[in-house]
Amino acid sequence: MREKFEEITSAEEQIQREFSHEVDVCVAAGCLSSGGQAVKTALEEAVSANGLAKTCKVRGVGCIGLCSEGPLVNVKNTQTLYGNVTVADVPAIVAGLDGEAMERLVISSEQPFFSRQTRVVLENSGLIDPERIEEYIAAQGYLALDKAMTEMTPSQVIEEVTLSGLRGRGGGGYPTGLKWTTVAKAAGMEKYVICNADEGDPGAFMDRSVLESDPHRILEGMLIAGYAVGASQGYIYVRAEYPLAIERLKLAIRQARRAGLLGNNIAGTTFNFNIDIRLGAGAFVCGEETALIASIEGKRGTPRLRPPYPAEYGLWGKPTLINNVETFASIAPILRNGGAWYAGLGTEKSKGTKVFALAGSIVNTGLIEVPMGTSLREIVYEIGGGIPGGKACKAVQTGGPSGGCIPAAYLDNPVDYESLRALGSIMGSGGMIVMDDSACMVDVARYFMEFCMTESCGKCIPCRVGTVQMHNLLVKITKGMATLEDLDHLEQLCEVVQHTSLCGLGQTAPNPVLSTLRYFKDEYLAHIEHKQCPAGICKMQIPVEVAL
């Protein structure tokens, strides 16, 4: 297999030598939504019209990261990155391939947004065409799979993953090597591997971008996992709202099958593995692994009691390995470079890197990857470029609707599993929403509670009823109609729902409320005692007797 890869790599290098210019256009969802496809088409037409078709190659690439400046165009031979490109800018870009760059649109690649990142999961994003397996192979793709099948036993693969210290990037942070070990040791010949791509957090787009930009990386990670645990069938569970990711995954699967990298007797070995896609209908609760399994089986997506855990009793009652997109995307570089290399990144207990989706009140919205332990301040003010309009940062929410709101006073704290938990938040899958001083933290808690209430599957009473009652109390507070007794009731409800709900949705739903009560209780008291919203967001409905 390695000889075939070398032939493909050599052919790709030859193609590159044939062109003196290469213009890369981001064709991930973020840039496409702001006109990226029209820019790419205009570039192709302009290159052809100027007689440059044989010397200039226009290529679509995955997410470059700086979504706030899209559409992004990178003139590769001059290392010139353009942002906010329109069709009207195309003639000048083509005319300046050998001349002066359009300074008005140039984005410095030396700025902290790029220079402060450590790209492991995203190492190919923005650099290869996600629709060509040849470019993935030329970027060392599938070498880790070849190494695993030809040089390592399944147990040695698991040992390397364990040595890396990789923890599940879906939010729980469970040691990946330990989960793989459990599935490998589970009794039975029939086992499954599932990639959880059901990304449902508001403001999160990490998994979507990886799937759109580097789909073969996920296939390779799943193949290695299947080899390690003894599985022959894999499923990618992805929400139907991600049509571009689904389209590219389907294409990648077809390409891998044609190349002999999926199916029976992969690369002439005895290893058999197939991957199929299952579409989710957008239920947030299906991000929970037992609800996801039920959905794949054709049942209503509701969680069940654990134990038994999926590693022993999962899909159709068989041992099942479930990891999320980012976890599988970390496997190939770990095997290529060694577990010790990966363990050298990050902190003592939180190894490696983490991908975050920066959103909210921040200059540089987009996708970033940093070593675990990087401070919130560096992410917000260095990589993120700070708060628009010179406003102050009020809080950063991590972990999606299940996470907590961390006040600006703690921006110097490191971002890792233990530190975030100590602050009353969680890592989650990687959503990071920045709020400026105009945000009302009571209204923020109300918003996320409304999301959890709506997304509750209703199976258990604490979550089904508790989220509704907590939301009602938060609405009452934002309208200036609550009492201090209501506030005590809200805190008690949070504790009950947190400790008695069936699955992670209910257990973590109170986090935004508890964290805002912990750090911003004065805002709750202002709404209750003074009938005022300090941020001016909430519309008070003050009773007549109170107004008089």
Image: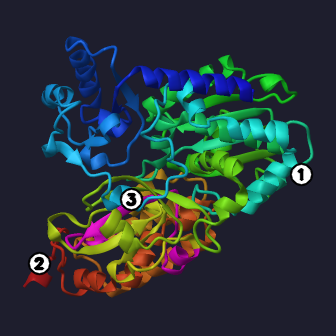
Amino acid type assigned to the residue bearing label 3 in the image: Ser
* Image quadrant containing the N terminus: top right
Res 420 seen here:
yes
Q: Front-most of 298 and 171? A: 171
Q: Is residue 491 magenta?
A: no
Please state which of the two labelled residues, at mark 1 or mark 3, is closer to the viewer.
3
- Residue at the spot x=56%, y=75% of the render? 496
Give the camera-side residue of 317 and 414.
414
**Considering only order in the chain, which callout, 3 or 1, is on the residue closer to the N terminus?**
3
Image spot of residue 517 (x, y percent): 39, 81
For mark 3, what is the residue? 115
Residue on which the image places disc 2: 544
Give the SS element for disc 2.
Answer: helix
Q: Does residue 103 lie above or below 344 as drawn?
A: above
Q: Give the magenta part as a residue range.
A: 418-447
Q: CA distance from mark 1 to mark 3?
A: 42 Å
The spot of residue 185 in percent (x, y) is: 89, 51
Quarter occupied by residue 346: bottom right
Question: How many residues crowd mark 1 within 10 Å: few (<14), some (14–19), many (20+)?
Answer: few
